[in-house]
Image: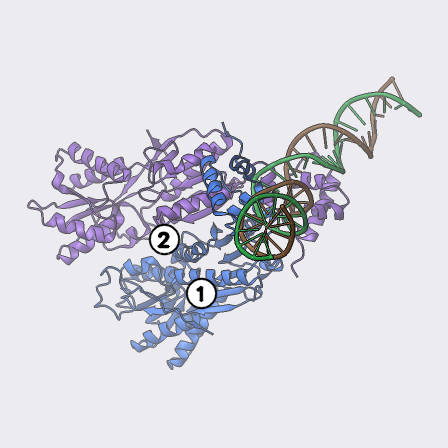
Chain colours: A purple, B blue, C brown, D green
Amino acid sequence: MTKARVTVIDIAKAAGVSKSTVSLVLQGSSLVNEATRAKVNTVMRDLGYVYNRGAANLRQAGAKSRIIGVVVNDLTNSFFAELAVGVDMVVQSAGFVQFLSNTGESIDRQREVVASMREHGISGLIVSPARATDAADFKPLVAAGIPVVVVVRNLPGAKVSSIVSDNRAGMVSAVKHLAGLGHKRIAFLGGFPDTAVFDDRLAGYRNGVEAAGLGYHEELVISSAPSRAGGVEAIGKAIALGLRPTAAVCFNDAVAFGVCDGLRSRRLEPGVDFAVVGFDDVIEAQAAVPALTTVSVDPQGIGRRGAQMLLKQINAGKAEAETMTTAVRLVVRESCGAGKTAPARAGKSVKSKQDAEECP
Amino acid sequence: MTKARVTVIDIAKAAGVSKSTVSLVLQGSSLVNEATRAKVNTVMRDLGYVYNRGAANLRQAGAKSRIIGVVVNDLTNSFFAELAVGVDMVVQSAGFVQFLSNTGESIDRQREVVASMREHGISGLIVSPARATDAADFKPLVAAGIPVVVVVRNLPGAKVSSIVSDNRAGMVSAVKHLAGLGHKRIAFLGGFPDTAVFDDRLAGYRNGVEAAGLGYHEELVISSAPSRAGGVEAIGKAIALGLRPTAAVCFNDAVAFGVCDGLRSRRLEPGVDFAVVGFDDVIEAQAAVPALTTVSVDPQGIGRRGAQMLLKQINAGKAEAETMTTAVRLVVRESCGAGKTAPARAGKSVKSKQDAEECP
DNA sequence: ATCAGTATTTGGAACGTTCCAATTCTGTCA
DNA sequence: TGACAGAATTGGAACGTTCCAAATACTGAT
């Protein structure tokens, strides 16, 4: 049944040329006569030849496999799905193929997946590392000359390129917006303090409140799991405070949704009795009630830019570690109490193109 | 800089054994002495050996590459992201690795991607085909003995396995539910008539209205693009009808959202003035206003089952084409006018585990 | 010490491709 | 006709692994 694989030698025999010539045709070399090329191509089609990239890679001494590995920590989260799509766009148009895996925040799984990708000879890796990833984990990769680009979360110690969104500036604008609405006590809710992203966002919050002349009060910073449940928990603590805040910026949208839940269970209406701002602008932010005011980060753009950076390094041969911050934009909807008039569901809404500038 | 690749021979030399022995260790053979195995493993770690799967596959004559290809038509749609996660779960625990690509409904891209996967020697393929995929497109794959499982959409002509959700039964239950609420004129809105999925869902609609004694009226079937915009368009036509319907089942959730948009722009409140039911139960369905009553299809479950089916075929060696239909479940929320009392945002909501039974 | 029998180890010979150096073909020009 | 330059083609020899058959090392019994 399963006929023996058709190889370049079979083609050569059938076309009456040598395997070397067939190889030349395969690589689109200009050395081969037009007539021969045509004949070989015909025979290949007739015999149903399929190129064996494994064999090719073997000979080419691990040079170019044209595979880009992409590792994300939670594919269920549409943020990362979009990121992957962004990567795929540029990767595919450069003639590479994408090898996407999901770690589900498991650091062991991440190790496996990366190892497997290495075995398959990827020519570059784009990764959104699982929480608590050791910076040293990617050392062997870069030592072997495989460019690595870390996205979304950064890995402080590692000598790899990275693209993160401008967490600090995003928080600053969120806080300023709330302050502009007249809020005097603004809380920072949610997130685990052990991540670099948390540090950045908190720093932005601090800058914001200080710039607005509100002063930084430690009791207004309440960390929790960066999830919906975490948000519920955090707002509970916030409300129990002696001097209760009237607004909050949240670590991310999931927390913000939880905060809304928590408010409602206490008979407070988010956007009316308490202003809430999220971070990420996940798909659901737009359709939720009230529509979430949040900081939009354009995951697809990050994916595209990450891929471009990676391809550049692959082509350059030399992997110069490079860091890039992408701009973010505050999207004002309803949950902050400002955009009440906005219809909030008029089709595409405010989520539009992002300006592609980077900040230092 | 880039040191020459460490090969099995280097290991052999350093460990004072032959390359054959190292190979045996690599494959976990029981033939090798425990002491030698330990020594070899140590040396491998020390030298930073990485297995070259390409070379291995080459020798093993295209047998087992341990790669499963997954091709979806729209990764941005969280439905497919979840599907991929489901596949990944079982694929990974079987020691395979997933090679995921997105076609974005481009049939050309799909061809490229599948070709590329073949070149890389996948041992099986799971695909949600792009619209208008030719059934013959996967012929070469199965001819080469590579099992293919088609999911979500089926390919009538092709001799491949497939898993689709029970579109017909889902629609029947949606229609029955609406009829039970007293609706007499129920429309079927959205979707392109050229797909098998459309046919199934429409057949279910027809069965449903007939079973409810309402009769099948052709003018109540209004097709459109299966998108939000398509939904707006379809509801517009529906409302313009002489005998206006009071409820609609929609081709999918995107259409249903569009229908809600269209209703509101005509000062009709979905769930109050007009009942709307969707299909798919995408993530947003739960958080929308009003929360969407829809037919839940558990994409992750489809992914898991598809992967199991594929692995079974890979192990069996022989690819017996097999067809499976997965059960669906009507999730009643607010948009049908029935579940008004439900809080709709009480955390996880109704979206729970699916019974894993299959129907003939 | 020898022998059978088992437990380990080991040199090639593939696998399908690319690369290199070398060869054979075309004309062209003297 | 012979020489010569290009163009086009071609045989190996890799690449890093696994497989096979065969070799060697041990074990206990004679």
Quadrant assignment for the C terminus of chain A? top left
Neighbour tally class for label 1: few under 14, some 14-19, many 20 plus, Cα within 10 Å: many
Horizontal and vertical percent position of residue B275: 31, 69
In the rendered view, does B312 fall on the left or right side of A163? right
Foreground mark, 2 or 1, reads 2
The residue closer to the viewer here, B20 or A227, is B20
Residue under the image location 16 percent in, 33 percent down:
A210
Horizontal and vertical percent position of residue B207: 43, 77
- Element under label 1? loop
In the rendered view, does A315 fall on the left or right side of A204? right
Residue under the image location 22 percent in, 66 percent down:
B342
Label 1 sits on what residue type?
Answer: Ser
Relative to A345, does residue B15 appear above or below in the rendering? above
The residue closer to the viewer here, B65 or B289, is B65
Q: Residue furthest bottom?
A: B213
Relative to B249, does residue B40 appear above or below in the rendering? above
Residue assigned mark 1: B223
Label 2 sits on what residue type?
Answer: Thr
Residue assigned mark 2: A76
Letter of the chain that mark 2 sits on in the rendering: A
The residue closer to the viewer here, B138 or B130, is B138
Quarter of the rendering containing residue A35: top right
Letter of the chain that mark 1 sits on in the rendering: B
Quarter of the rendering containing residue D24: top right
